[in-house]
Image: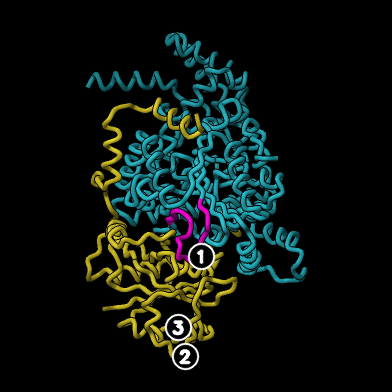
Chain colours: A yellow, B cyan
Amino acid sequence: MSARDRILARLASRLATGADREAAVSARLAGERPDTPRPMQSRTTPEERVEAFIARAVKADATASLIGSMADLPAALADELRRRNLGPSVRAGSDPALAALDWGGVEVSRGVGRIEEPATLSVAPYGLAETGSLAFCSGPENPVTLTFLGETHFAVVRAGDIHAGFEELFAAHRASGRDPRTLNFVTGPSRSADIGQTLQLGAHGPVALHIFVVGE
Amino acid sequence: MTAHEPTSRLFKENVKAAMADPNLQKAMKNAGEGFVGKRRAAAGGVPEFDQIRDAARDLKNHVLGHLDLYLARYEEKVTAAGGHVHWAETAEDMRRIVLDICRSVDAKTVNKGKTMISEEAGINGWLEENGIRPVETDLGEYIIQLRGEAPSHIIAPAIHVTSDEVEALFRERHTHLPADRNLSELSSMLSEARTILRQKYFEAEVGITGANMLIAETGQSIIVTNEGNGDLSQSLPKVHIVLASLEKIVPTMEDAATVLRVLARSATGQDMSVYTTLSSGPRRAEDPDGPEQYHVILLDNGRTEMVGTEFQEMLRCIRCGACMNHCPVYQAVGGHAYGWVYPGPMGAVLTPSLIGVEEGGMLPNASTFCGRCEAVCPMRIPLPKMMRHWREREFERNLSPKAARYGLKFWAAFAERPALYRLATRAAIFALGLMGRKRGRFAKLPLAGGWTAQRDFPAPEGGTFMAAWARAQKVKGAR
């Protein structure tokens, strides 16, 4: 008997038996679940959603700005880079939404994150109003290392992709058919309180996170 | 040394040392109330918080009642995504599996995200013995690894270290940097550690992380962090190994959300931790980054033996640390006094389950039964009740100290004879009242040195509780 079989047999001998157990598990995994309470924060109306998302992202020490359309991104990004005394270049993936843009004076290099990345840019397929989080999917379009290696991480999310709560976000994710290795929820820039129990921003990941919310 | 040898049976001696350690006392004083206030504010910000706690409890009870079935479903999904599930009955099994995987890719360096299961299984010492260098990348874990210590808190492993001690440690160990560099600011220490560890991420062949949850629906493992080190540790090396205990299962992504909604608020008082990552399998065919291999090692180590017993509810624990943040005993002595991997109230219950009541049986006595741990536990684990179960077992098995056993027997001899008990307490109260009439308190009392060493004992006034109760009942009856 393998370790696996011994462990499962030990559990089975200690738990109730019966065919209904298997059915209960199948039903639960098929999406049947008891009514589960949700926090007030997860029940924004469409009208208040973007505002709530930004407020909560800012509470988590991110910064954010609204832009009218994707076409406005290059100019908005150039402004942000200047304001932060960063050079006019970013690292990004092959996301078609970025590839289609005229970047003007900003040099966009493509590829994975390297050991030093002053500025990186990713597109988040989802935002979460409940917590002010972004959710990224790993892959060539937005390599996962860009999310963690950029000293300043710039993120783009469409207002229409911001969901009220986890339930709506996960429903959209299942419906999209995406199957990334990682789904990364990001809520503000990285931080640590491990030295002297005093919170500091910029642990191993980005020191700053700026979100461009693209209106319709 | 493959694991930190437990010193839980020396709890009393450990406590004395902890109380006499000025650095530890300074660090604990500095840390203490911060967590409490932040949790209160975060929980208070969600009107439905207590209902979500109930739902989280029910969800985990459902999983534990069907754990064998969920584990089998979870394994199918991991395998379908191209990952591998390994089953470890003991810590030793887990060490062997980790080493086999590391050797298969000829690993020299292994990066570690924060994982308590690694501490439980003694992975670091074992890798070192076998010529592989483990590098802790969580800043707190990095600090204690340099100090040669175990974590003293499950989410703030270096909570017992002051910033002055960190500065001295960095100067002593980072000898490649100029000795006269300025480290007076916390930010300069953080940036120094960041630079050193950034290099390590690109050197390691294997990355090890823990798992806050495992999702049966999708075969994903979840890590929740604030630093980003767990993600760099799993995304840059060739191999990602997840170490998880087998009760970490939740059915679906929505169920994970229910737990996430109470986890960060209970732990650090954040609405959401900075990074919550759901990982499945190795990198996809078209992916330019991410690991080429994904392994999950499920650890039993005594947990299946808890299922179906009065300790099963402990398996709901999500390792938020709220119980220790709110424990007066933990706050006074810190985590190392508990002598093994898990400190505070959750450690007092879990340690005897995992390493035996002979070694860990002292820990459930480290409680005033004030009940704060249970009051704040997001999974509503009845910690004080379970500590009482352990005390009973310790007594049944003749493991408690002789003086305590004789004292209890002596007391029981009276308690089982109510008339004698009342007579004896009346006499004692009368005598003490007479002796203490002048000052109203005692600075010293025979057999009560443990009390009077710290504070005076008030002299009794006006008879026993039983007498007062009888009088009150009589008055009530007369009305």
Chain for mark 2?
Answer: A
Q: Which mark is residue A160?
A: none
Residue type, mark 1 in image? Asp
Image quadrant occupied by the N terminus of chain B: top right
Image quadrant occupied by the C terminus of chain B: top left
Q: CA distance from mark 2 to mark 1?
A: 28 Å
Residue type, mark 2 in image? Gly
**Image spot of residue B314 (x, y percent):** 44, 35
Does residue A23 appear in the picture of this structure? yes
- Residue B242 is left or right of residue A170, and the answer is right
- Residue A201 is left or right of residue A34, and the answer is right
- Do the residues indicated by labels 2 and 1 lie within the same chain of the protein? no
Q: Is residue A50 shown above or below B256?
A: below
Which numbered mark, 3 or 1, is in the foreground of this view? 1
Q: Which mark is residue A105?
A: 2
Residue B470 lies in the magenta stretch: no
Q: Which mark is residue A80?
A: 3
The magenta segment is B278-294
What residue is shown with label 1?
Answer: B289
Q: Residue at x 39, y 79 (%)?
A: A98
